[in-house]
Amino acid sequence: MASSSRKRRKLLLRSLHLFGLDHLDPIILASLADESPLLLIGKHGTAKSELLNRIAEALKLRHRHYNASLIAFDDLLGFPVPNQERTALTYLRTEGDLWDAESVLLDEISRCRIDLQNKLFPIIHERRVQGIELEKLVYRWSAMNPPGDDSEEDRLESYRGSEPLDIALADRFAFVVQMPDWNTQSADDQHRIILAGNDPPTEAVSQKLRRLVETGQRLIPEVRRQIDDRTAAYVRTVVKLLGDAG
């Protein structure tokens, strides 16, 4: 029975033709059920963007995918103009703006300017922009390469344009996931990636993923009631130990 359960769990990302990521199934599903911000960190080519875009496609979300290193803030909102009464600003809408989005992927977030990161902060943390609630936005996702390393020995292997996130922004991602790279994949998974890695999710997979997310959302309140006291004790202990360790 346990083996059968493990097999079912492993089908989540595999069913989206994302191979070698079986161990991430529970984390990705938890982030979807909890609707909390998710950050993927990994080398180029580790399917960070592909994973998030395929999930959006499978869940049939109104999805926006922005390269945070290239966009201007107006790209998210439209061009600001005074309203007819000239008492406030309104925005000239575009097809690619954020107002009606249900999910957003802010890609390459570690490569964008700090002033833009500050403007993205309330989108990720509060689902707000310029103080206005983004009523339809549910999922806030980001992806980045590992921060660059200027040490001589790692210079050739590092991403020198990828900077560490501001600590307050990084802290707003409830789920921070390290993506495995090609060299850590099994030969079988490498084979599957080559043969089927570009196939889109089917309608059956979409329905299954939606059911899993809905089931998780129904279970969350009960799980929280069961573990609240233990969770609080665990967090207090871990925070103290981290503080003691500096």
Image (cartoon, rainbow, N blue to C red):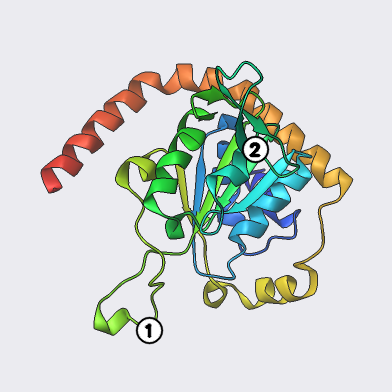
Where disc 1 sits, the SS reads loop
Under mark 2, the amino acid is Leu
Viewer-proximal residue among 198 and 20: 198
Side (left or right) of 246 relative to 83: left
Label 2 crowd bin: few (<14), some (14–19), many (20+), radius 10 Å: many
The alpha-carbon separation of the residues under discs 2 and 1 comes to 37 Å
Numbered tag placed on residue 175 in the rendering: none
Residue named by callout 1: 156
Residue drawn at 78 percent across, 66 percent down:
198
Viewer-proximal residue among 242 and 161: 161
Q: Quadrant of the N terminus?
A: top right
Q: Residue furthest right?
A: 203
- Image coords of residue 211 (percent x, y): 75, 32
Where disc 2 sits, the SS reads loop
User: Which of the two discs, 2 and 1, sits closer to the camera?
Assistant: 2
Viewer-proximal residue among 239 and 162: 162
Query: Looking at the picture, does residue 102 appear above or below residue 2?
Result: above
Numbered tag placed on residue 98 in the rendering: 2
Q: Earlier in the sequence, mark 2 or mark 1?
A: 2
Under mark 1, the amino acid is Leu
Side (left or right) of 233 relative to 173: left
* Callout count: 2
